[in-house]
Amino acid sequence: MPNIHKLNNGITLITDLVNTVETVSVGMWNKVGARNERKEINGVAHLLEHMAFKGTVNRSATDIANEVEMVGNSHNAYTSREITAYYMSGLKENVDLSIDVISDILQNSTFDSKELDKERGVILQEIGMYADEPDSIVTDKFDELAYPNQPMGRSILGSSEIIKSISRDEVEGFMKSFYNPKKMVFSVSGNFKEDKIIKLIEDKFQNLPQGNDDYIPPSIYEGGEYREEKKLEQVKLLLGFESVDIHSDLYYATRVYSALLGSGMSSRLFQEIREKRGLVYSIYSSGDFFSDSGIFYVYAGTGHKEVKELIPVLCDQLNIDANSFTEEELIKTKAKFKVGILKSEESISSRCRSNATNYLMHNKIRTTDEFISKIDAVQLEDLEKARKNFIKSNLTVSSIGPIQNLETAELIKRRLS
């Protein structure tokens, strides 16, 4: 079981000793993300994350890359709706370097204007790449419809216009306003000496930002429809509903329902829609779960003729009372979860990330046994409660491609009960 340390510098440190490996993964996870952005600087959290490795008062961007990779370490970062993370993995003898670099980028970044302009160009290329991908367009439009006129519905990347105009002061200002040790978890997993790690984190992180901006607008789901006629080989379709947040009593049941319905080759959607009818190449169900909201959705890629048959069949599957599912299906789905959980336990980097995100979102670390027991406790009647909970909500439908035969969201909603 990982140990939790509340340090004098305000950081929560999680140490997870695995002495059977030769590596260590470390990182700082911040409870700050795209949902903290005001409209006029949408994309700044992601831009800030990109800039972190672009030079400090002690190291240039090239210095950071060379120093890290000289010893075989890997480093990366990510921005999500609610979390931004900076992390590194390497041999156990190089853990000091990993911690030093992360402490440097979070306390001494210069946000050099020339580097900012270059990284602006990189992100504009990233935005352009996704704009060429129909799946990405459908996803972005789906989010906009589900959460209109609020940070949760805006692109994490931001728009090209805003990225071009965000100033250096706005990037640095976002860090100074929102980053704070009380929102930070430093996570360490692998082979290390705990006393040494505690001292390093105490000593190295003495000058973190002390931001006190608490702008976190609530997530308000609405739903709607986006249709884009485009010359493509397939209709790309996302169909979804309001679901539960990560704290809900129906959270685990919703995840199990989603997996049983549309995860894997033996799932109901795959068997009924692809294997029996050949209507799609890809179809699956999934969900996005946040601290105060959630979405359940089905993705499908299908032909312009096939979409006419797909919608009634898909709605029929969503209308099935989950109490009629078999115990065999439930056992099989639970087994998939258990394998996935146990596999992630065997990855040092996965453990490092999981410990940090669990603590940030739940204020505790959920053990493997706890997670498995929650999954094991789900019964068929719980799946039906989860299904009934989302099926009654407003519908969100996002589509692109040859959509002449795709029913409107209003007609699709009439098929659902």
Image (tube, grey):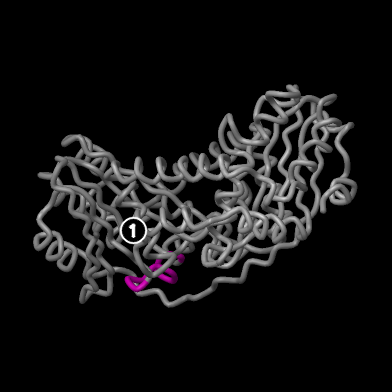
For the record, the magenta segment spans 174-182
Quadrant, the N terminus:
bottom left
231 relative to 220, above or below: above
* Dominant secondary structure of the residues highlighted in magenta in the image: helix
- Residue 89 % position (x, y): 25, 43
Whether residue 244 sits left or right of residue 337 in the image: it is right
Looking at the rendered structure, the secondary structure element under dot 1 is loop
Q: Residue furthest front?
A: 327
Residue 150 in magenta stretch = no
Q: Which residue is drawn at the image coordinates 81% and 26% (left, top)?
A: 306
> How many marks overall?
1
Whether residue 103 sits left or right of residue 319 in the image: it is left
- Residue 290 % position (x, y): 55, 61
Residue 179 in magenta stretch = yes
- Residue 72 % position (x, y): 20, 34
The quadrant in which residue 314 appears is top right
40 relative to 331, above or below: below
Nearest to the observer: residue 121 or residue 101: 101
Nearest to the observer: residue 7 or residue 248: 248
Q: Which residue is drawn at the image coordinates 20% and 46% (left, top)?
A: 24
Q: Amino acid at mark 1?
A: Thr
Q: Which residue is drawn at the image coordinates 24% and 60% (left, top)?
A: 2
| Residue that badge 1 annotates | 367
Q: Residues within 10 Å of mark 1 (few under 14, many from 20)?
A: some
- Residue 354 % position (x, y): 36, 53
The quadrant in which residue 11 appears is bottom left
